[in-house]
Amino acid sequence: MEHDISLITTLAAGFGVALILGFIAERIKLPALVGYLVAGIIIGPATPGFVADIHTASQLAEVGVMLLMFGVGLHFSLDDLLAVKRIALPGAVVQMSLATLLGMGIAWGWGWSLGAGLIFGLSLSCASTVVLLKALEARGILDSMNGRIAVGWLVVEDLATVLILVLLPPLAGVLGGDAGSGDGAPLWQTIGQTLLQVSAFIALMLIVGRRVLPWLLWQVARTGSRELFTLAVIAVAIGIAYGASALFHVSFALGAFFAGMVMRESEFSHRAAEESLPLRDAFSVLFFVSVGMLFVPNILVEQPLQVLAVVAIIVIGKSLAAMALVLLFRYPLNTALTVAASLAQIGEFSFILAALGISLKLMPAEGMSLILAGALISIALNPLVFAVVKPLGRSALARRLEGRDDPYAELPMSTERKFLEGQVVLIGFGRVGKRIAARLDERGIPYVIVEQNREQVESLRQQGYAAVSGNAAEPGVLIQAHIAHAAMLVVAVPDTLNIRQMADTARSLNPAIEIVLRTHSEEESRLLRTENLGTVFFGEEELARGMSQHVLQRFAPAAGRD
């Protein structure tokens, strides 16, 4: 291999082999991520044949990390996190702590140091956001309450991991690793200085970045050049990541994350995400390929028990801990199983943490191979885990757990009679539901809200609303909303999977009830109208109707004069 074309050779080999194995992985119903990792193993130094330039691949991987974190920042919604904060925040922190302790326990049994065990345990504790989003999208539950809780849980994990990435370098010396460029200053001073630098960077991004970045994107957008806009987005992501590292000694990952988070505040955030997606996907592939190049396959033969222990912590230990925590917060078994299955894998942050641990001489190189083995096996098993938990969520046990005493699962005894007869039952209190509720309030029409988010139901009760917690697809939930004596059922959530069950349950309990349904699919709206379930509103159709009405009203006087 010619040295002066090592970059081209690495790119050609990485993309080519990743394409073939990613395609094969998708065909056998595995995430393409598994194929990318295996591609890295094949072109890595641990297997015979062609070996790509690992130093070039590692630099390309750094770009992949920046763009991955930039994408996480672009999709990070503080509002979505706050909506599930009461379960996601304590749940993620406790689950990460338990998984870390499990990892430290087996590492201690292997004779590893405290620092090595800590990095190892932390690497096993954080699941892959990429794998989770793909799994939820494939099952059509990304926008469901269960999906939002799982995503919020992982957002907390991501934020906690980012904080760990910031604090690890100054703590490396204390944990038995490489103290880096330590100048002999006390530990508290080093940590304080690190946090001060990070705080200064965050403040600069939130105060200056929020004003400068939208203005910059607006100026570029005014040129009408799509290429310039894409270039601006990528330049912002990588430029801020590099500047954060050079000026504030902040990791590339944190710099890119805040670049994406600040850009989300701009009205161009959707376009920025769309324009940068191809490049983010390409470099994220190289990131996973470069990680695979570090894997030593012999570990599967030489240390099978260690690999099994790692997989058991990821797939069983983390899942059981998460499920127990969700049930402890009195959420349904279906929600607990969804969160448990979502966390039964590890991914990109685990690799970043492990790589940092090795660079700081905290963890032995075999730790990365064990983590990679755990990632490959857990990601491959994840679709099977989701398939196993699906029927459990509809079992008799699930129904019994649904019936547990829950103060928000039924209306209080003090509820006024107007909410119990002739009322509207409003399913969902999101963006659409809130607007419908506001119009009902204007007319003085009583209604009962059914919402899966228990925290939101608690807040609504405190504001004086009549609200019930639960999944409206379950007959017991609609019964508690007094559907049998209601005048109308309004489904304000785009729940494709359960919308028919809601309508059928309402009809069986109250044959005379009027039903209003919301859908976001033209084909679904046609099928629902064919089945005559009720009055169906399709978003784009209603938007076109409203705009057409405005245009016709504007030209009505002119038409009259003619």
Image: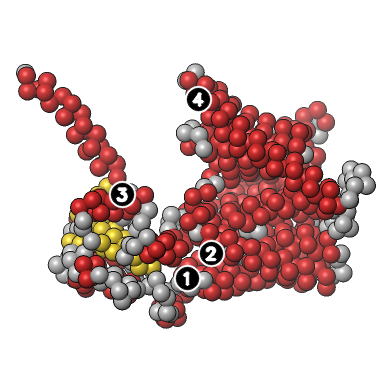
Mark 2 vs 3, N-terminal side: 2
Q: Earlier in the sequence, mark 3 or mark 4?
A: 4
In the displayed structure image, the side of residue 100 where residue 32 appears, left or right: left
Q: Position of residue 358 (x, y in %)?
A: 82, 52
Numbered label tally:
4
**What amino acid is labelled 3 in the image?**
Arg
Residue 268, image x, y percentages: 49, 32
Q: Position of residue 352 (x, y in %)?
A: 72, 50
Label 4 Cα neighbours within 10 Å, binned few <14 / some 14-19 / many ≥20: some
The local crowd at label 3, few if under 14, some if 14 to 19, many if 20 or more residues have their Cα within 10 Å, is few
Say which element carries label 2.
helix
First-in-chain label (4 vs 1):
4
Label 4's element? helix
Which residue has dot 1 on it?
331
Q: Earlier in the sequence, mark 2 or mark 4?
A: 2
532 sits left or right of 100 in the view:
left
Instruction: Say which residue label 4 marks.
Output: 218
The answer to whether residue 527 is left or right of residue 402 is left
Q: How far, Cα to Cα, is label 3 from label 4?
A: 31 Å
Q: Does the CB distance between marks 1 and 2 fall below 8 Å?
A: yes
Residue at 48 percent of width and 73 percent of height: 330
In this rendered view, identify the residue nearer to me: 558 or 209. 209
Specify the amino acid type for callout 4: Trp
Distance, label 4 to label 1, CA atoms, is: 44 Å
Write down the residue under mark 3: 435
Local crowd size for mark 2, using a 10 Å CA cut-off: few (<14), some (14–19), many (≥20): many
Residues under numbered marks 1 and 3 in contact, where contact means CB atoms less than 8 Å apart? no
Residue bearing the label numbered 2: 87
**Visual colour scheme:** secondary structure
Q: What amino acid is at disc 1?
A: Tyr
